[in-house]
Image (cartoon, coloured by chain):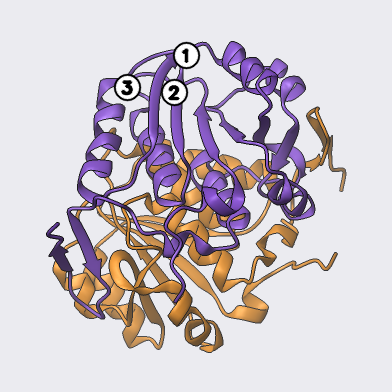
Chain colours: A purple, B orange
Amino acid sequence: MSTLKNPSRIYGKVYVLRLGHRVGRDKRITTHVGLVARAFGANGFIIEGICDDSVMSSIAKALSIWGGHMLLDCGVQGLEYVKSWRESGGEVIHLTMYGLPLDDIIDYIRVSPKPKLIIVGAEKVERIYYNVSDYNIAVGHQPHSEVSALAIFLDRLFRGQWTNIEFEGAKLKIIPSIRGKRVVKIEY
Amino acid sequence: MSTLKNPSRIYGKVYVLRLGHRVGRDKRITTHVGLVARAFGANGFIIEGICDDSVMSSIAKALSIWGGHMLLDCGVQGLEYVKSWRESGGEVIHLTMYGLPLDDIIDYIRVSPKPKLIIVGAEKVERIYYNVSDYNIAVGHQPHSEVSALAIFLDRLFRGQWTNIEFEGAKLKIIPSIRGKRVVKIEY
């Protein structure tokens, strides 16, 4: 099995911007979006509008225990962030069920060396984000979840290789097992 | 593009059992699990222990608007449900980060004609479920989400063909678009 210490060395850097987080209501979904960003190899996770300590601390805790390096930020102004991302040479990919089919576009996105900002919204995303994004991409044209949409997107982008990422600095590691829970402490 | 009206005709029937749902706290995550089950081609979605009307009505609404047929059930006793599933000739697949790697096992699971019950838990799943399942399967060995784990599992099981499912009885359909939201009403 090949290992993939850092997928951004092959595929360029990928960051995830979560729009429209609502404290309380979205706490667990936004946390799961952040955990998917980490587990599937993104380099950063940014929450627009607000800083929700319970979300940030859950993701920081996962990084501390299970390793990996990821930029974490919150409270940014979404539209300014997207515009300055593009002005500094990055590209912006908005995940929406109304967009173009993922499987038709992903090969074009994968070969681009530009840093990628993936936008995932809560229930409604303002129309302006459809216009300022380089790509509006549908992970299927059915309602499901921003958690699953992000996972499938990153899976396709990284050609399934996220399962081989080595998370640096991990304190714990799972040994796959048929029926049990085998977890080992890593000594450095 | 080939269409896939009913993936269960090729791959056998697949049902999703959600364990440990907590009213309030898990409302949105469980709803997203149910929406993933529908969008990725499962034949049924069952919630253990309790009936949470807000979850059931959200999934029923998606079925009504976007089409498709899916068994919906709730309030079942989890362990009894799993045991009777096996006794009636089905197999049980528990998704857990401690299990065997998905990519090593999925080909064996895919060729089995047995009806499949996929178990997805909330934070802690009782040890007994590890023992009564035919397979404990890890969708990566990092913490992320039951929403993304189920999506990736069904994606692999159906070889990515869930994007071609035709949902019968849909009232609305999305026309993929570069920047807009194009939705057409379907007349029967």
Residue B180 position, x and y percent, is: 80, 27
Out of B186 and B126, give the one closest to the viewer: B126
Q: Up-down: is A71 above or below B31?
A: above
How far apart are the alpha carbons under marks 2 and 3?
A: 14 Å
Residue B99 position, x and y percent, is: 30, 72
Q: Up-down: is A54 above or below B176?
A: above
Out of A177 and B176, give the one closest to the viewer: A177
Q: Residue A24 bears which disc, if any?
A: 3
Question: Do the residues at discs 2 and 3 belong to one chain?
Answer: yes
Chain under disc 1? A
Chain under disc 3? A
Residue A77 position, x and y percent, is: 52, 11
Q: In the rendered view of the protein, which quadrant contains the C terminus of chain A?
A: bottom left
Q: Residue A47 bears which disc, if any?
A: 2
Classify residue A97 as left or right of residue A100.
left
Q: Residue at x 46, y 53 (%)?
A: A6
Where disc 2 sits, the SS reads: strand
Q: Earlier in the sequence, mark 2 or mark 3?
A: 3
Question: Do the residues at discs 1 and 3 belong to one chain?
Answer: yes
What residue did someone put label 1 on? A76
The answer to whether the residue labelled 1 contacts the one labelled 2, judged by CB atoms less than 8 Å apart, is: yes
Type of amino acid under label 1: Val
Type of amino acid under label 2: Ile
Where disc 1 sits, the SS reads: strand
- Foreground: disc 1 or disc 3: 1
The quarter holding residue B183 reads top right
